[in-house]
Image (cartoon, grey):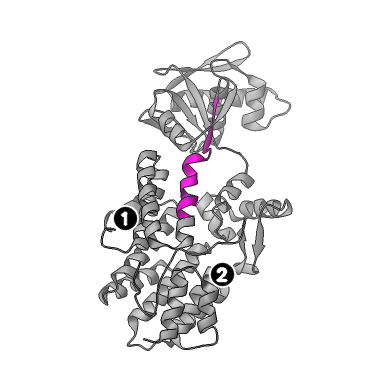
Amino acid sequence: MDAVITAAARALAAGDPLGALNRVGLRDDPPALALRGIAMAQLGDFVRAKALLRSAARSFSPMEAAARARCVVAEADVALNSRDSGWPAGALKAAWATLEEHGDRVNGAYARYLEVRRLLLVGRIDEAERMVAELKAAPFPPALRTVHQLVVAGIAIRRLRTKAARAALARAHRAADLARIPALTAEVESASLVLSTPAARLIASGEERPLLLGDVEALLASKALVVDACRHVVRQARTVVSLARRPVLFVLARALGEAWPKDVPRDLLLARAFGARRADESHRARLRVEVARLRIVLRALLGVGATKRGFTLTPRNARKVVVLAPPVEDDRASVLAFLADGQSWSSSTLAIALGMSQRTVQRALDSLAAAGKVQWFGRGRARRWMTRPVAGFTTTLLLPVSLPSG
């Protein structure tokens, strides 16, 4: 093995992309191109990184199928970290099959974890969980064990299983300490902040306070009737009624939940549900119809009673009614929350992840950019948005040679 290539690979594994470029920056043989591509990715130049990795994949001979597959996996890693939704998942699956066929279990497993992370990113948690269950982290080196535990923690967080998430993050910390990769340690620390950062607001009896993720888990496990504005459902224990496709009904349920045990005046309900500044008889008739629908949809959980000035909720089996709301509520806040991971996102991928139209996301991004809260680079389809420069990649895809993990 070329000693210069090996030294460059070791520099990348240690989180030193400039050191790697100093060794192979002027070389254009396939292993050097691949390492240059990973180094450029670590430095945040995703366009150049993808071009170098594709050039490396083309330059490897047909007999070097495993090396080509590693380039494909590295390009998929770049796509994931640059939030490029256009990456073909089929190419990644073919690459991991090739790597496992050639005995490269470590990079083959890393390719599978990339697919799991992509599924988590777009909210396909069930599929991600099934894939993780098929992977056993014990025989892998520390870096890959860290990635495994981060994925396990990510699933647990999305499932609101904070105890399991803390345990997985603790294992990730231990594995990252053994891996000695600064970017990987930083990713574990960043993921851990989720458990100590306000995840929602509790609104009850006209007052509100922030909730951590563990508090949200405890609230949803309690006997309280929860109007969940994060998921647009009304729930109590295991009974969950979705109003995600009934926005007017959810607005009414939330307004009544925020005021409980008091009633809500009809004029206020008209303003919130229909935006009616000056209500007429047609608005009032529509309100009566929507309240009747709300009674029917939520009859298993609550009743809606009329008062002299408006309406009020009457829970059937709960002693308390609360509203669970996002920490900040507007389109800009949702977009900014996704950008807070420090990665660069395309507007199309943000729209998929948020379940919004791309035009709505673009307006929010333009507004945030005008306020100096986000920045962009690239043009056209290559434009990416971020809150701060990317610190580095966690991947240690050592394309030319497998190096010791210690």
Q: Residue at x 47, y 72 (%)?
A: 12
Q: Earlier in the sequence, mark 1 or mark 2?
A: 2
Q: Residue at x 26, y 75 (%)?
A: 103
Residue 270 in picture, x, y percent from top left? 64, 26
Please tell me whether mark 1 or mark 2 is closer to you in this view. 2
Residue 122, numbered label: none
Residue denoted by label 2: 43
Secondary structure of the residue carrying tag 1 is helix
Q: In this view of the protein, which residue sits in the foreground, 339 or 391? A: 391
Secondary structure of the residue carrying tag 2 is loop
100 lies above or below 271: below
Residue 393 in picture, x, y percent from top left? 49, 64
Q: Residue at x 37, y 76 (%)?
A: 69
Quarter of the image holding residue 222? Answer: top left
For residue 178, side relative to residue 26 (left or right) = left
Q: In this view of the protein, which residue sits in the foreground, 259 or 241? A: 259
Dot 1 amino acid type: Val
Q: Is residue 169 magenta?
A: no
Q: CA distance from mark 1 to mark 2?
A: 29 Å
Q: Residue at x 42, y 69 (%)?
A: 396
Residue 267 in picture, x, y percent from top left? 67, 22
Q: Would residue 87 be visible to someone looking at this image?
A: no
For residue 145, side relative to residue 273 (left or right) = left
243 lies above or below 296: below
369 lies above or below 300: below
Dot 2 amino acid type: Leu
For residue 181, side relative to residue 19 (left or right) = left
Contact between marks 1 and 2 (CB within 8 A): the answer is no
Find the magenta span and give its range. 187-203
Residue denoted by label 1: 132
